[in-house]
């Protein structure tokens, strides 16, 4: 039989429109193939710096997001009780009138009565600008319940952390160590990097209680006990210091290891200009750290007894408390394995080192003929940070990298512009509220001592989330997870309007989900009004949170909107280049919806916010695209760095260019400016990099700095707790502040506060790679990959409880109980259970059938986690957060598990909410071409 | 009964690296997207928003757990997770072709790709029964058999840039775990990878002579025992005082870098 003749060169599409993905937070470049004006196929953009052509499952499934039946269609006004899902569609004009009716009186009297929190927001420099103009101090995005410990610990320690701040030097690294649950952030770049180093034969060590994903391909798996990463890391620090396997030259030159610590105050010794003092090995005299020709001495002690930081570290970490034998049982890692890994780090960092022939000049004016590689790199995200000890654990990890001399060295960890940027180069928090006026500056920033806290004169918190208070002084990203419970409790005060964006707070984005639903629907018995009187919410989809709002501003999908991935915000830079990007409407919405940021331009103008109105009172920005093009944050600095100036020939600094967005579109949706040769490594100290950064507008002046092994601002808080200074913590927090604000990393055990004696098993969640951070778990294709989320249990616990796959178990924490299906997993720490996060759905949400597997068998661990710790009997309820940053301690959850009779559905089960968008179709065969 | 060609000019296929696959499903969805829009009937989904959604996929990733046998050196080996992407292997002795009653299933003489001519397919499902790998799926909406085409409408497609003339799954794989090429050419990338890394046939006992090759995972958890690495952690001091003394000596020995 003759073979059929095939059309081997069918037309692929009419046109390719290049924009930026938003199926998660990684912001890859995508080619959107169009046929007949419709989206036909989505693939990665090969030219794009983030993904270089590859694309994950989420990205390719974007086409099912654009046609999702859960898309909201028009502004909605609640007509039934809160939580019922009963709405009527209204016009945008009516929606704005309602919003203005609530917001204008607040602004005219007390702007702090508005709490404006944005969730998975990629426009924080814009939304914060709006909130600042409104005048409320109550603004943050979701960092506080995500990974602020990693970010803040990185910035205070070395001027940046992982993911958006930096990346392994994939081209030169020979050993990559991955800590914690991390199949999420930086998803494609990490996979590309793993592929690259595997192809070269470099080794991967995975430290994670769960051997899935990246840990499945790791050459060596360390199935650590959750919450003990800091102890493991400090044990390796112990081994490395004891063996002298630390990079002395690097530590002396680029870190505060040689800086003298005042023996009385614990603060760093400084000269009259405020510069840290080191002992110059040539003269033996205290000398400013940046003096030309200084040779900072790590060994000598000041004649008055002040010792350098490294002495303090030796005293702490050489202690037998950190010996592998002392920590092995707690960490669940044999002592010899801890030693073997430490030895391997030392071997690769120092024995496999090499020189890159790059000539460079440091900030002291010394020219070097090469750069020394330390080819050990590391990565971590939420896994080690979402614990009450997370800040200090992240600090420990950064300190480990610095001791090995790997940070910014070839083969190690490299910052991405605008990082490195030390904490001192960031703003401080601003909280001065004035009726009818903007806030006095940006909300979020970095505190450097008690004087920077956000406290009223009576010592109560200025912010509704209690950020920057003695409970969590360094809460650099705010505490979104505490907003609803604080507002409900009326402490620190009642609010009038809660305004949120892309944050599923009545479901998977809250601890204590059932409690939060109650708080959102509770009424004040005196007035009969809701305790939180008004809730405005913006989302593109019919999420669980929609049902709990009074007014819905329907957002667009990511292919129907303008966005900028800005250097002012969370950029997409690479270690070799500064880069930013846009989204643009590659299709127009077929519904009465509007990009949330454009709606804020409208609403800002209606409210007369100064940043959103012209002098004559007219609307300043027609929409977000107009803002992106024309907004100036500082003279010459706007949201986008590329093609600035009237002719579009300026980079970084320049006047607005009316054709800037088109230039981005013509270039594939992004802009890249490469760091010059010689400036790519050693950036915090490299004059060529510092000068380039100034020319780009990343800094206004060169600002070389020392890495902070010892974080002095923490010692300032600790001194206050010891009674020094005028600004004093309340007595009940004194001991806690003194213990936790330790300027050197230490490990504390979060388990006792979570009643580990009665609840001996740790329960964790991960996001599946095909759904991480995705606003698309209802996606028709993706839900076929991860529609079930059994509770994975280790073999030992399955046997002890007589469980088999498909059985059900009752899981009990100090806070609550769930009953869920279980499945055995052998490659799992033997005292840990886990499930995929956010698979479980509320019946009626997301345009899914009420019998959807996600609603019947899916479940959330959130029901087991409370925003407060169990009572300790001391009269206080402590938050389930890191005491330094306030990061939600999701992964400290302790539970008991026992076999249970199979219920008809996962418990707890909630009644359905009415879908404002109906249900999806019965069948799908989505071919847009003929 | 349909004839296989006695030989093919090329043997196009995939190398799938099980040492590198992280199980992210990028290939699964990229394949779904391309092949829904392109070759033949779209890959349909039933109850896409319903109680139990199911649809047609030409490529799926399965995850397996493996617990290595205990040895005297490793009495308690850790369990391992292996992600295993599976699609048509374009077998040289493809039982799905010979079983086809209408000739709809065939293996191309020029490149060895196994395809279904949907106009001749009666949806009887015999080929899916015959395939030992479970690589074929009957589309419930269209009633025809669907399978991996190796993106035959991409790999020769002159409307695509040359660098994109590879299967969608290969182009998208973030970890670079999938490779496409001609196994008939001993110098091709896929032939070299297979030789270097010991690529294997899947289920060779079935006698299907699959073209696609799997690269086995490298040995895991092989970090040397600490005694081998001990020299790297030879102590320089046992207490802080000794450490400071060592520091002083070590700093004296540092080569002076710089100009």
Image: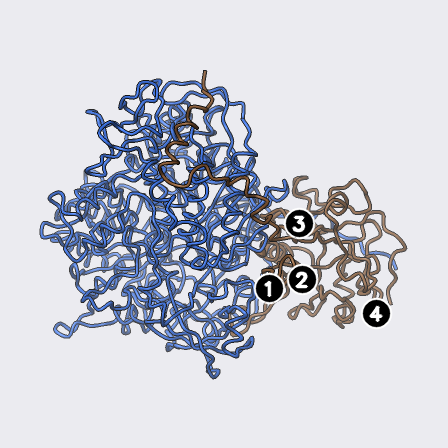
Chain colours: A blue, B brown
Report how far apart the C-alphas of labels 4 and 2 lie in the structure. 21 Å
* Residue that protrudes farthest toward the right in the picture: B6
Q: Mark 1 — residue?
A: A925
Report how far apart the C-alphas of labels 2 and 1 lie in the structure. 9 Å
Q: Say which of A35 and A467 sits in front.
A: A467
- Side (left or right) of A10 relative to B46: right
Is the N terminus of chain A in the top left, top right, bottom left or bottom right quadrant? bottom right
Subunit that carries the residue with mark 3: B
Q: Mark 2 — residue?
A: B41
- Give the crowd class for mark 2: few <14, some 14-19, many >=20 residues within 10 Å: many
The answer to whether A633 is drawn above or below residue A485 in the figure is above
> Is tag 3's residue or tag 2's residue first in the polypeptide sequence?
2
Circle number at residue A6:
none
In this rendering, do the residues under marks 1 and 3 share a single chain?
no
- Side (left or right) of B110 relative to A250: right
> Is tag 4's residue or tag 3's residue first in the polypeptide sequence?
4
Q: Mark 3 — residue?
A: B178
Q: Mark 4 — residue?
A: B101
Taking the spot 80% from the left edge, 58% from the top edge, the residue there is B91
> Is tag 4's residue or tag 2's residue first in the polypeptide sequence?
2
Subunit that carries the residue with mark 1: A
Taking the spot 36% from the left edge, 39% from the top edge, the residue there is B240
Q: Say which of A318 and B17 sits in front.
A: A318
Locate residue A39, reporting x and y percent.
54, 52
Q: Are marks 2 and 1 in contact (CB under 8 Å)?
A: yes
Report how far apart the C-alphas of labels 4 and 3 lie in the structure. 33 Å
Locate residue B160, reporting x and y percent.
66, 43
Q: Say which of B146 and A407 sits in front.
A: A407
Q: Are marks 1 and 4 in contact (CB under 8 Å)?
A: no
């Amino acid at each position: 039989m003759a073979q059929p003749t095939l059309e081997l060169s069918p037309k692929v599409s009419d046109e390719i429109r290049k924009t930026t993905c938003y199926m998660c937070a990684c912001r890859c470049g995508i080619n959107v193939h169009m046929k007949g004006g419709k989206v036909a196929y989505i693939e990665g953009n090969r030219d794009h710096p983030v993904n270089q052509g590859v694309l994950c499952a989420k990205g390719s499934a974007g086409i099912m997001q654009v046609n999702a039946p859960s898309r909201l269609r028009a502004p909605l006004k609640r007509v039934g009780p809160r939580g019922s899902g009963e709405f009527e569609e209204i016009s945008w004009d009516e929606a704005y009138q309602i919003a203005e009716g609530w917001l204008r009186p607040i602004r005219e009297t007390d702007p702090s009565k508005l709490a404006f929190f944005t969730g998975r927001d990629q426009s924080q420099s814009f939304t914060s600008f709006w909130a600042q103009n409104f005048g409320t101090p109550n603004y943050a995005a979701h960092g506080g319940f995500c990974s602020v410990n990693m970010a803040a610990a990185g910035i205070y320690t070395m001027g940046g952390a992982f993911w958006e701040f930096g990346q392994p030097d994939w081209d030169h690294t020979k050993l990559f160590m991955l800590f914690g649950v991390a199949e999420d952030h930086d998803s494609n770049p990490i996979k590309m990097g793993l592929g690259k180093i595997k192809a070269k034969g470099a080794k991967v060590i995975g430290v994670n209680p769960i051997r899935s994903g990246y840990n499945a391909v790791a050459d060596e798996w360390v199935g650590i006990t959750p919450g003990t990463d800091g102890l493991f890391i400090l044990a390796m620090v112990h081994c490395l210091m004891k063996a002298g396997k630390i990079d002395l030259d690097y530590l002396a030159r680029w870190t505060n290891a040689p800086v003298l610590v005042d023996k009385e105050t614990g603060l760093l010794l400084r000269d009259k200009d405020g510069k840290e003092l080191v002992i110059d090995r040539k003269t033996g005299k205290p000398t400013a750290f940046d003096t030309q020709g200084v040779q900072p001495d790590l060994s000598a002690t000041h004649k008055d007894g002040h010792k350098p930081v490294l002495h303090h570290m030796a005293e702490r970490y050489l202690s037998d408390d950190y010996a592998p034998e002392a920590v092995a049982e707690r960490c669940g890692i044999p002592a010899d394995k801890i030693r073997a890994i430490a030895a391997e780090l030392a071997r690769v960092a120092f024995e496999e080192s090499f020189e890159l022939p790059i000539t460079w000049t440091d900030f002291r004016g010394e020219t070097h003929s090469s750069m020394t590689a330390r080819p050990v790199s590391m990565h971590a995200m939420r896994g080690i940070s979402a614990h009450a000890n997370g800040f200090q654990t992240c600090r420990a990890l950064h300190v480990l990298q610095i001791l090995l001399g790997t940070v910014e060295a070839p083969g190690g960890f490299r910052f991405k512009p605008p990082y490195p940027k030390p904490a001192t180069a960031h703003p401080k928090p601003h909280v001065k509220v004035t009726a009818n006026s903007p806030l006095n500056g940006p909300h979020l920033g970095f505190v450097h001592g008690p004087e920077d806290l956000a406290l009223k004169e009576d010592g109560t918190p200025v912010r509704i989330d209690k950020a920057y208070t003695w409970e969590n002084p360094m809460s650099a990203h705010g505490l979104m997870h505490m907003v609803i419970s604080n507002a409900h409790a009326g402490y620190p005060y009642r609010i009038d309007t809660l305004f949120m964006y892309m944050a599923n707070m009545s479901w998977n984005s809250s601890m204590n989900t059932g409690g939060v639903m109650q708080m959102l629907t509770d009424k004040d018995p005196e007035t009969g009004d809701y305790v939180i009187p008004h809730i405005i919410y913006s989302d593109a989809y019919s999420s669980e949170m929609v049902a709990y709002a009074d007014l819905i501003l329907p957002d667009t999908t990511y292919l129907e909107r303008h966005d900028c991935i800005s250097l002012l915000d969370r950029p997409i830079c690479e270690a070799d280049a500064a880069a930013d990007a846009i989204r643009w409407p590659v299709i127009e919405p077929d519904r009465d919806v509007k990009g949330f940021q454009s709606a804020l331009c409208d609403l800002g103008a209606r409210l007369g916010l100064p940043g959103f109105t012209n002098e004559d009172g007219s609307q300043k920005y027609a929409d977000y695209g107009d803002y992106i093009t024309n907004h100036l944050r500082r003279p010459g600095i706007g949201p986008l760095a590329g093609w600035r100036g009237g002719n579009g020939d300026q980079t970084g600094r320049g006047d607005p260019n009316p054709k800037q967005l088109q230039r981005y579109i013509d270039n594939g949706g992004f802009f890249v400016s490469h760091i010059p040769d010689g400036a790519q490594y050693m950036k915090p100290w490299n004059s060529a990099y510092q000068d380039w950064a100034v020319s780009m507008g990343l800094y206004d002046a060169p600002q070389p700095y020392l890495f902070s092994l010892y974080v002095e601002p923490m010692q300032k808080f600790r001194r206050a707790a010891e009674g020094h200074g005028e600004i004093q913590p309340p007595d009940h927090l004194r001991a806690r502040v003194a213990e936790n604000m330790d300027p050197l990393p230490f490990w504390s055990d979060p388990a006792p506060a979570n009643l580990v004696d009665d609840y001996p098993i740790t329960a964790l969640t991960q996001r599946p790679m095909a759904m991480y951070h995705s606003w698309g778990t209802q996606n028709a294709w993706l839900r076929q990959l991860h529609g079930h989320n059994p509770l994975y249990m280790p073999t030992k616990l399955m046997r002890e409880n007589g469980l088999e796959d498909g059985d059900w178990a009752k899981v009990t924490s100090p806070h609550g109980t769930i009953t869920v299906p279980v499945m055995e997993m052998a490659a799992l720490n033997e005292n840990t259970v886990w499930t995929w996060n956010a698979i479980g759905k509320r019946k009626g949400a997301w345009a899914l059938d009420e019998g959807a597997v996600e609603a019947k068998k899916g479940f959330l661990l959130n029901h087991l986690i409370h925003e407060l710790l169990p009572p300790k009997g001391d009269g206080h309820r402590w938050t389930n957060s890191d005491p330094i940053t306030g990061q939600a301690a999701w992964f400290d959850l302790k539970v008991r598990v026992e076999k249970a009779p199979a219920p008809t559905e996962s418990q707890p089960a909630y009644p359905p909410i009415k879908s404002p968008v109906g249900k999806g179709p019965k069948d799908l065969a989505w071919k847009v071409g003929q | 009964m349909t004839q296989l060609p006695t030989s093919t000019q090329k043997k196009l296929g995939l190398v799938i690296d099980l040492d590198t696959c992280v199980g992210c499903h990028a290939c699964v969805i990229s394949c779904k997207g391309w092949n829904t829009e392109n070759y033949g009937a779209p890959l349909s989904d039933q109850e896409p928003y319903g109680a139990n959604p199911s649809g047609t996929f030409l490529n799926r990733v399965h995850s397996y757990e493996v617990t290595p046998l205990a040895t005297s050196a490793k009495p308690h080996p850790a369990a391992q997770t292996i992600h295993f992407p599976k699609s048509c292997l374009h077998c040289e002795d493809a039982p799905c072709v010979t079983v086809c009653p209408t000739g709809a299933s065939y293996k191309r003489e020029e490149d060895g790709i196994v395809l279904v001519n949907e106009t001749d397919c009666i949806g009887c499902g015999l080929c899916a029964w015959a395939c030992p790998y479970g690589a074929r799926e009957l589309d419930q909406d269209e009633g025809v058999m669907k399978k991996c085409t190796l993106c035959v409408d991409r790999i020769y497609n002159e409307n695509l840039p040359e660098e994109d003339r590879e299967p969608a799954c290969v182009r998208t794989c973030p970890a670079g775990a999938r490779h496409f090429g001609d196994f008939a050419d001993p110098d091709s990338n896929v032939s070299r990878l297979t030789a270097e890394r010991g690529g294997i046939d899947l289920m060779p006992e079935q006698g299907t002579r699959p073209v696609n090759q799997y690269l086995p995972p490298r040995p895991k958890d092989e970090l040397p025992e600490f005694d081998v690495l001990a020299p790297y952690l030879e102590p320089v001091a046992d207490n802080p005082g000794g450490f400071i003394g060592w520091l002083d000596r070590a700093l004296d020995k540092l080569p002076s870098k710089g100009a």
